[in-house]
Image (cartoon, rainbow, N blue to C red):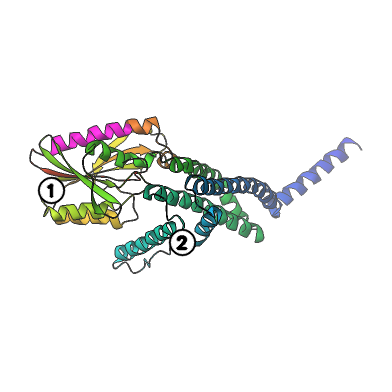
């Protein structure tokens, strides 16, 4: 073959390849194969996280809590609990309807735990509930990702598979954090989200805890001539309580004679920000779906009470895992910031309501 024939053959091959790449779906099919292999490997890894979490939950319930048929308890929970959101296109009274559904859900889950864990102390039972919910979340996300992947493959929907391939690495990181969180709750250790209750604990000390709402307590302490009503979830079990309802009840009992409401909570940091940083703002720092937050806002606006917010910044992984030294340093800064707000913005003889928002696991 002489040079002219070789050159002509190369040009034909080039034009053929160019045609195949631009006028057929071969490139998309090749990409689909690559993305499929990648997603399958990630799904297999997520499945191992689900299996490991399920095994940890079973071991905790059987070995630590000494409950028979632990595997049945875990499997029934993770497959049988869900909540349907209220109708949102008709917003009238949506908060009341949402609160009702959340209360029914919580009651059902606690009844389930009491049925299968009857002789387990309350704080350990609450820790077990969180462990079961973490396992349930991992299982649900795995099944959802698998559903969309199989749907994309079934219909050769390369756009759907591409989107999964792009987001699944980030989701894996989040799910790894959930998987590790089980160890903190089975051990009953404070997590990052315990920052608010830990601030409240440091203000309360060993003062008497009085019940004020479901799984929620408060203490009355004196500080520099001010009377502090400090609210937190009842510990040391994994509970968040009803801080909004507690704040509203206390303010109403005091007939609005409150100089200030201060809420303290964990908050997700932005990428590039340091864990354990704190910030001060205005409004109710509480990450619930709405019912608890709106109770604080309503009672504050009713009596024209200023509402301050102090947050401790952390990543989503830090929020659900054992509290790190950086987050704990942020808690200490938050305690000092709360004291500073009280001294600078109230006077001697004033009443201040402080709510430490978050999961109080490991915090009495």
Magenta span has 331?
A: yes
The answer to which of marks 2 and 1 sits earlier in the sequence is: 2
The residue positioned farthest toward the left in the image shown: 349
Circle 1 sits on which residue?
Answer: 258
In which quadrant of the rendered image does the N terminus lie?
A: top right
Q: Residue 235 is drawn in which quadrant?
A: top left
**Residue at (81%, 41%) from the top-left corner?**
10
**Residue at (50%, 58%) from the top-left corner?**
77
Is residue 5 found left or right of 232 in the rendered image?
Answer: right
Q: Which span of residues is magenta-colored?
A: 330-346
Percent x, y for residue 97? 33, 66
Which SS class for mark 1? loop
**Dots 2 and 1: beta carbons under 8 Å?**
no
Q: Residue 89 is drawn in which quadrant?
A: bottom left
Which SS class for mark 2? loop
Q: Residue 82, which numbered label?
A: 2
Percent x, y for residue 307? 20, 47
In which quadrant of the rendered image does the C terminus lie?
A: top left
- Measure the alpha-carbon separation of dots 2 and 1: 39 Å
Percent x, y for residue 284? 25, 48
């Amino acid at each position: 073959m002489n040079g002219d024939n070789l050159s002509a053959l190369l040009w034909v091959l080039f034009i053929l390849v160019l045609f195949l790449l631009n006028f057929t779906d071969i490139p998309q099919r090749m990409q689909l194969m690559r993305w499929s292999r990648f997603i399958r490997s990630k799904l297999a890894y997520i499945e191992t996280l689900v299996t490991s979490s399920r095994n940890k939950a079973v071991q905790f319930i059987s070995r630590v809590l000494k409950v028979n048929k632990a595997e049945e308890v875990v499997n029934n929970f993770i497959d049988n609990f869900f909540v349907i959101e209220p109708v949102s296109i008709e917003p009238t009274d949506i908060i009341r309807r949402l609160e009702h559904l959340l209360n029914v859900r919580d009651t059902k889950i606690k009844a389930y735990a009491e049925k299968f864990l009857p002789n387990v102390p309350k704080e350990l039972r609450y820790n077990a509930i969180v462990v079961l919910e973490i396992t349930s979340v991992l299982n649900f996300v795995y099944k959802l990702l698998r559903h969309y992947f199989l749907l994309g493959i079934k219909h050769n929907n390369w756009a759907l598979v591409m989107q999964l391939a792009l987001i699944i690495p980030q989701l894996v990181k989040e799910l790894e954090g959930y998987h590790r969180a089980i160890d903190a709750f089975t051990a009953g250790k404070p997590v990052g989200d315990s920052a608010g209750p830990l601030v409240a604990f440091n203000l309360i000390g060993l003062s008497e805890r009085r019940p004020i709402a479901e799984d929620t307590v408060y203490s009355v302490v004196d500080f520099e001539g001010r009377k502090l009503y400090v609210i937190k979830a009842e510990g040391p079990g994994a509970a968040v309580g009803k801080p909004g309802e507690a704040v509203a009840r206390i303010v109403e009992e005091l007939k609005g004679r409150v100089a200030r409401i201060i809420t303290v909570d964990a908050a997700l940091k932005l990428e590039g920000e340091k864990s354990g940083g704190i910030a001060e703002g205005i409004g109710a720092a509480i990450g619930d779906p709405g019912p608890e937050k709106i109770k604080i806002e309503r009672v504050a606006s009713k009596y024209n009470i200023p509402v301050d917010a102090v947050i401790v910044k952390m990543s989503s992984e830090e929020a659900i895992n054992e509290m790190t030294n950086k987050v704990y340093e942020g808690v200490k800064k938050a305690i000092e910031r709360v004291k500073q707000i009280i001294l600078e913005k109230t006077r001697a003889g004033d009443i201040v309501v402080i709510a430490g928002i978050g999961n109080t696991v490991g915090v009495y």
